[in-house]
Image (cartoon, helix red, strand yellow):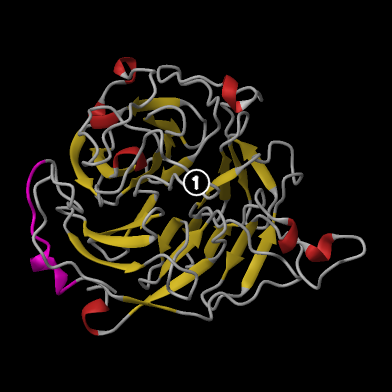
């Protein structure tokens, strides 16, 4: 684990890791109390039935501390599926189910789902959630995708609706004002079960957060960056910026808006990957503060690439986040898929207090981290996409790393 002890600079400086609005914050006072983690290299246990592990695009820990993961099959390569040919050309593997449930020891408890499992199954899975009754919700990011609900055993229960037409993605246009459908599909979502509300980060094409009734699907409210009313959000592409400096402190969200997670004390934490920042709101959409996360990392522009680009790296830092599960939810753990690091921030002021990971394929390193979750014991689970394709467990250490419960 690495710990930052230098004072955090002002928000405009390129070396800033995190800050609240324009207030300079020192992380030195927090560093001695920050949780520290070590990887459990034997978790999870090998998948049964020659199943391959594919993109672990999202993870959710349910009320029983079972770990649910999406095993997205879209990008499986032929060399990973040698046992599926007829006759098999290799001993392993075959496509596994797209929904996996693990116990604390890393055993598979349940596994189900595939692209032909039921009508309306997402064309490209993105997010998983599990409610207090252990119902499982899945969403996807292809035109025509929505959220679908199942029992924990995989029995179909209901469809959230609001589906856009199944058209080529190139034909889908930004429209931040309408709330009836989700033409580009539904990316990230999370629940406020006490209020029976679902928060949707509609930010793969649009740039807003929307809230719907969890049971009826009725629209309730929504907002853009810094609490901008839906009617005032523009429908223009997010502009590029000079990558020699930090992203501009623009009022509107920059795509991609990658998550929206409510906290226990009434706030909503929104991942704005396109600006290397977290914006914090009340549940009614009033802007409260913002934290910048490693803003020296380019977050958008014409030279943002991906796995197959030899010249243009991935962009943005805030792929996802989880709030720690101590009673005060003292920390924010940020999954940074460009730097392949988990940044640990103090939730109150955004100060950077520690980190773990680093790019690589050894146990404890990360490659294309895209998802993160924490159980009630303080264990952290990370999922990797693109060609990382694994789930790892990080255990809180003794001493300074006891998670301060």
- Exactly how many numbered labels are in the figure? 1
**272 is within the stretch colored magenta:** no
Residue farthest to the bottom?
398
Is any atom of residue 61 visible in this view? Answer: no
Element on which disc 1 rests = loop
Q: Quadrant of residue 53?
A: bottom right
Residue farthest to the front?
311
Q: Nearer the viewer, residue 194 or 290?
A: 290
Please tell me whether the stretch drawn in magenta is mainly helix, strand or loop.
Answer: loop
Residue lying at 56% horizontally and 41% vertically, measured from the top left: 139
Image location (x, y in percent) of residue 373? 42, 60
- Badge 1: few (under 14), some or many (20 or more) residues near its Cα, within 10 Å? some
Residue farthest to the right?
87
Image location (x, y in percent) of residue 95? 74, 59
Left or right relative to 151: residue 35: left
Image location (x, y in percent) of residue 309? 51, 46
**30 is within the stretch colored magenta:** yes
Q: Quadrant of residue 282?
A: top left
User: Which quadrant does the C terminus fall into?
Assistant: bottom left
Image location (x, y in percent) of residue 56? 55, 57
Q: Nearer the viewer, residue 17 or 120?
A: 17
In the image, is residue 226 above or below residue 332?
A: above
In the image, is residue 344 above or below residue 141?
A: below
* Residues shaded magenta: 22-33
Left or right relative to 259: residue 84: right
Q: Which residue is mark 1?
A: 306
Left or right relative to 197: residue 116: right
Residue lying at 39% horizontally and 18% vertically, measured from the top left: 235
């Amino acid at each position: 684990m690495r710990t930052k002890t230098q004072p955090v600079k002002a928000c405009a400086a390129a070396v800033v890791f995190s800050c609240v609005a324009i207030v300079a914050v020192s992380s030195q006072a927090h560093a001695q109390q920050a949780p520290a983690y070590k990887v459990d290299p034997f978790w999870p246990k090998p998948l049964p039935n020659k199943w391959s592990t594919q993109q672990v695009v999202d993870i959710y820990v349910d009320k029983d501390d079972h770990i649910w993961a999406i095993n997205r099959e879209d990008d499986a390569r032929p060399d990973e599926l040698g046992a599926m040919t007829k006759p098999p050309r290799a001993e392993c593997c075959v496509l596994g189910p797209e929904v996996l449930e693990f116990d604390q020891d890393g055993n598979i408890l349940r596994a189900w789902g595939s692209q032909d499992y039921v009508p309306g199954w997402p064309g490209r899975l993105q997010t998983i959630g599990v409610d207090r009754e252990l119902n499982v919700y899945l969403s996807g990011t292809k035109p025509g995708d929505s959220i679908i609900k199942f029992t924990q055993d995989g029995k179909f229960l209901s469809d959230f609706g609001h589906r856009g037409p199944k058209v080529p993605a190139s034909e889908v246009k930004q429209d931040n004002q309408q709330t009836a459908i989700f033409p580009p599909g539904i990316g990230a979502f999370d629940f406020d079960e006490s209020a029976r509300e679902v928060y949707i980060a509609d930010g793969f094409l649009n740039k807003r957060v929307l809230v719907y009734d969890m049971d009826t699907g009725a629209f309730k409210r929504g907002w853009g960056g810094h609490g901008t009313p839906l009617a005032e959000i523009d429908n223009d592409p997010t502009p590029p910026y000079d990558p020699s400096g930090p992203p501009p402190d623009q009022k509107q969200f920059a795509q991609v808006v990658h998550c929206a997670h409510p906290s226990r004390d009434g706030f909503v934490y929104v991942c704005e990957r396109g600006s290397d920042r977290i914006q914090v709101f009340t549940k009614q959409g009033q802007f409260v503060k913002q934290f910048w996360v490693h803003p020296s990392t380019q977050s958008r522009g014409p030279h943002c690439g991906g796995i197959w680009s030899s010249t243009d790296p991935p962009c943005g830092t805030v792929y996802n986040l989880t709030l720690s599960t101590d009673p005060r939810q003292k920390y924010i753990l940020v999954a940074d898929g460009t730097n392949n690091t988990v940044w640990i921030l103090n939730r109150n002021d955004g100060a950077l207090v520690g980190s773990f990971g680093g790019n690589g394929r050894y146990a404890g390193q990360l490659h294309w981290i895209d998802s993160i979750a924490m159980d009630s014991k303080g264990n952290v689970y990370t999922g990797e996409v693109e060609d990382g394709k694994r789930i790892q467990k990080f255990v809180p250490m003794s001493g300074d790393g006891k998670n301060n419960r």
